[in-house]
Image (spheres, grey):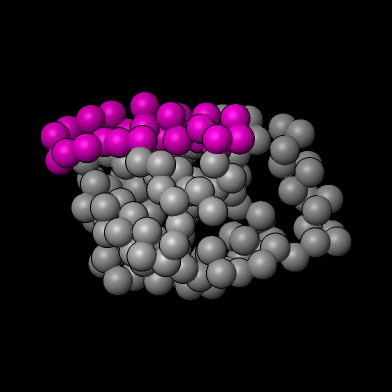
Amino acid sequence: MKIAMASDHGGFELKNAIKAHLIERGFEIDDLGTNSEESVNYPEFGKKCAEYVASGKAPLGIVCCGTGIGIGIAANKVHGIRCAELVTPFMAEMAKKHNHANMVSLGGRILSIEEGIKLVDIWLDTEEEHGRHDVRVAMLDEM
Ligand code: RB5
């Protein structure tokens, strides 16, 4: 499966570590930048990754910035994107089960590399729950 990824400078190291881990797991990664620790603007990279996912070029996306907040806000401005910030294992599980999150955001300055990788693995390995959750997710997608 293909996964789109992007970060600003604050999430650059975490993005690269998650990317290497996912390639090892057999995923195909489309890395949309940034490509160094030089300061860049997170809205540009959140938007770029979210538009990539919304257009169907990849079914899932992962974005990283310093806190995971700004780049996730940017991603959620794109119609069709449900981007959840991952901070705890429970959030990673619920983001998929209940919210059918097609993108996640993580903070390179709040998570260790190991924590970030663990959260992404939980999100990827959890199945969506349907029924009442489909109704709520459809309401999100209508907004
Ligand atoms: C960049 O310094 C920082 O503001 C950014 O990475 C992120 O934390 C924004 O939400």
> Can you give x and y, in whole percent of width and height, for residue 21 in the image?
34, 64
Quadrant of the image for the C terminus?
A: top right
Asked if the stretch drawn in magenta spans residue 44, the answer is yes
Residue at the image position 38 percent from the left and 54 percent from the top: 106
> At x 34% / y 70%, what residue is drawn?
115
Q: Is residue 118 magenta?
A: no
Q: Nearer the viewer, residue 26 or 13?
A: 26
* Residue 138 coordinates in the image, percent (x, y): 78, 43
Q: Is residue 35 left or right of residue 75?
A: left
Q: Say whether residue 107 is left or right of residue 3.
A: left
Dividing the picture into quadrants, the one containing residue 44 is top left
Tell me the magenta residue range.
Answer: 32-57
- Residue 52 visible in the current orientation: yes
At 53% from the left and 64% from the top, the residue drawn is 123
Above/below status of 25 relative to 5: below
> Is 68 left, or right, of 66 in this rendering?
right
**Image position, residue 74 (x, y; %):** 46, 33
User: From the viewer's perspective, is 135 left or right of 83?
Assistant: right
Residue 6, image x, y percentages: 36, 41
Tell me the residue at 80%/53% (across/down). 134
